Each structure stands twice: as C-alpha cells, then as structure tokens.
Image (cartoon, grey):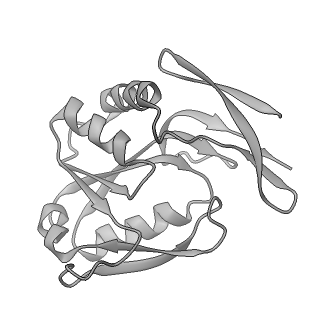
Amino acid sequence: MRTHKVEVGNVTRELPVVPVAPGVSVALFNMLGDTEVTEAAGRELARLLPPEVDVLVTPEVKALGLAHVISRETGKPYVVIRKTQKPYMVDPVAREVVSITTGKPQLLVLDGFDVPKIRGHKVAIVDDVVSSGGTLNSLRQIIEEVGGEVAAVVAVFTEGQERPEVTALGHLPLYT
C-alpha cells in the first residue's frame, strides 16, 4: 500500500493513501486512538494559539482529543459541535455540510446550552484536517450566528489547496 510520511512534533507516522472519490485519494490522518500523535499535535498547536482566544470549538469525533489536549495546555475551555441532534438539546443551531472524507451530507449541531460559552467570545476552531473547507465554513457560520468571533483556526494538517487562514503543523497533498 502507498503511504505518505508525516511528522507531528517529534512523532513520525506513515499514513496510508486511500481513495475517497473517483480519481482522488488522500493520505489518511486518523488521530483516534493515537495518544502519542494527539498529545504531540495538541502541545504544538497550543503554543501557536493566539492569546486573545477565549474558547475552543471543535467538531465531534476525530478532533475531540486534540481540543482536549489544547484545552489542558492553555487552560481555555472547549465546546463540541455534535454530528447528530440529541433529544436533550435545547434550541440547537444546526448546519449541513459535505466533507471530503464523508462524501455525503452530515449535520453539525451546537446545543443551545453551549451558546453562552461562545456568544461575545473570541473562538479558535480546532480540527484535525482542513481540506475542502466545508466543515470549517459551517462551523464559522454557527459560531457567528450565535454571536462568537472566529479569531483563529488551528489544525494538524491542511490538505489539497493551500489554506492561509488555517494555522497548521503541516500540509497533505491530494493524490489524483
């Protein structure tokens, strides 16, 4: 199998190159269950976080551990935007997005209970990989709708086209 070598802090990984659409493959970066990479990435990104950031916002699942490490390192709280609406949510704010890795529409949902944690605050969006920007744009819309200001976007990697608005530790190519 074809691989792509990456370094995250002092940790090296060989990422498998996998197809995600006809004629398009990516170097699959999956932090879930990789404590060493998550810790290294979180420490590095915490150092790069602008001091004016009040709160971190992350989409559910793959970047959750990363947000936790950055929160621990900086003392800044984090909010998780879920991928499903739960019955206990009060006045949820939702957006639909199509991510390159899912290839189909998915929901991003902010629980109304978390709105006060964002409203009037400077927010850093935390993600594992920013590729097409679909998830990033939906997160930004939700944050701005509830009165937060996106002050930074941090990710372990950008992918495909360059994303100057994202502070990342590295860049992954798209394979065609």
Q: What residue is shown at x 68% (from left), y 49% (from top)?
A: 161
Q: What residue is shown at x 38% (from left), y 59% (from top)?
A: 60
108 with respect to 11 (left or right) = left
Q: Nearer the viewer, residue 87 or 148?
A: 87
Evaluate whether residue 50 shows in this view: no
Q: Is residue 129 above or below residue 140?
A: above
143 with respect to 27 (left or right) = left
Where residue 50 sits, quadrant-wise, is top left
Q: Position of residue 57 (x, y in %)?
A: 30, 55
Q: Position of residue 176 (x, y in %)?
A: 86, 50
Where residue 75 sits, quadrant-wise, is top left
Q: Nearer the viewer, residue 123 or 176?
A: 176
Q: Position of residue 83 (x, y in %)?
A: 41, 69
Q: Is residue 32 above or below residue 120?
A: above
Q: What residue is shown at x 78% (from left), y 50% (from top)?
A: 25
Evaluate whether residue 137 shows in this view: yes
